[in-house]
Amino acid sequence: MVGEEPKTYDASTIVVLEGLEAVRKRPGMYIGSIGERGLHHLVFVVAEHALNEILDGTAGRVEITLTADGAIRVADDGTGLPVEHADHSDGPPLETRLTELCCGVQPANRRSLFGSNHFGVGLAVVNALSGRLTAEVRRDGARWVLEYERGVAVAAPARTGPADGIGTAIIFWPDAEIFETLEFSFDALAERLKELAFLNRDLDITLTDDRDPAMPQVVRFHFPGGLKDHIAEQGTFFLSDLIGFEREYSDMEGTVEVALRWCDSREERITSYANSLPTPCGGTHELGFRDGLAAAVNGYAREQQLLTPYDPDFTPTQLTAGLTAVVSVKLDHPELEGPTRGRLGNAPVHACVTQAVQDHLTTWLHTNPAQATTVLTRISMTARN
């Protein structure tokens, strides 16, 4: 303002936030929101960390519990994460994972490279945004407990006695000083966990709500059929076959899994994922699916003379009317673009998905001529109307 001396900007005005202090100062940068969406994101971060244990082949089940005192408990039956005080040396110790951003472990096998959270900000963000956090590790016949308050250890990790079995449990209470609400939605959590189970057929996950002892809720998600199980429970279908496949491609350094079926409605329902994360804006994997679908169906229609040389190809809109499909790719290095990171940008993925869909669907059309005719008749009716 007029009359005021101008402010001086020099090195003394620069504030550097380090470690978990930066997370607490700007939580939205790390979890997207301090409302219900961000609250649930904490659960998914810990759940996906446990999922990576399953992909590594070191765990088989994940159990998530909403407790009566407002905490979330996420437990797995893995080998138990390393604890520095126990002299475990088979990976970054749990103390480091809970206090250092972007701390991960080199995956044990190729499949586990495709987890969504190996070198993300990870457990440290959950610790920073929790009023309290307790970690329990059971391995080598001993039980270790680590306790934190707002990201700061309240004591050294303690061996609390013998332990039956193995595994890791993270129990955390979101910080009321950070979040606008501390009320978890059982339905919202169940929806995402079910989605993760469809996308990762090895995952066996249970969600329990113990907040009201008079009305406990328990759901279990395990889908050995993967995406085909996902498609099977959606809508009413006129096509008896549920089409699905999974392939690995070195060109894209990853895998392609697709499931599809034409249903009785005229609605298009195509969803896509990259490393188990939704890609609502599509991207190269979804474009590849549509191109592969068009190549297979139009090629078969011309081969069977269902389209004359004078007829145009069926349009993408005609081909996908009534189609329910899920496209999932898992990559070493997914390039997620856009302001919400909802679009996949990896260029090699397009050609790989196109080829996979075209090859598999072309084979299916030729080996199932009666159902192929049903599909083409339906598409032709859509084209005429």
Image (cartoon, rainbow, N blue to C red):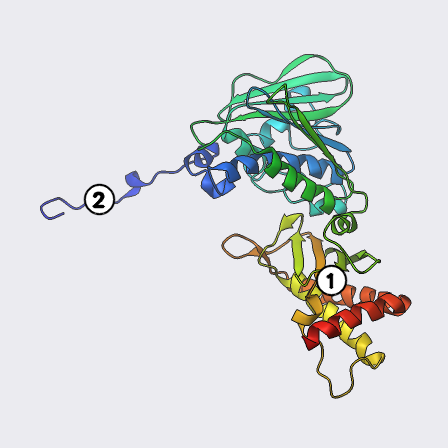
Residue 24 position (above or below residue 71): below
Ranked by sequence position, the earlier of labels 2 and 1 is 2
Q: Residue furthest front?
A: 385
- Residue 111, position as x, y percentages in the image: 76, 46
Residue on which disc 1 sits:
251
Nearer to us of marks 2 and 1 is 1
Around disc 2, counting alpha carbons within 10 Å, would you say few (fewer than 14), some (14 to 19), or many (20 or more)?
few
Instruction: Give the structural element (helix, strand or loop) at label 2.
Output: loop
Disc 2/disc 1 C-alpha distance (Å): 54 Å
Q: Quadrant of the C terminus?
A: bottom right
- Residue 136, position as x, y percentages in the image: 65, 21
Q: Residue at x 61, y 54 (%)?
A: 279
149 displayed left or right of 256: left
Instruction: Specify whether residue 44 is in view.
Output: no
Q: Quick one: 236 or 194, which is closer to the camera?
A: 236
Instruction: Give the structural element (helix, strand or loop) at label 1.
Output: loop
- Please give the count of numbered marks on the rendered protein: 2
Q: Residue at x 82, y 68 (%)?
A: 374
Amino acid type indicated by mark 1? Asp
Q: Quick one: 24 or 260, which is closer to the camera?
A: 260
Residue 112 position (above or below residue 244): above
Residue 168 position (above or below residue 349): above
Residue on which disc 2 sits:
8
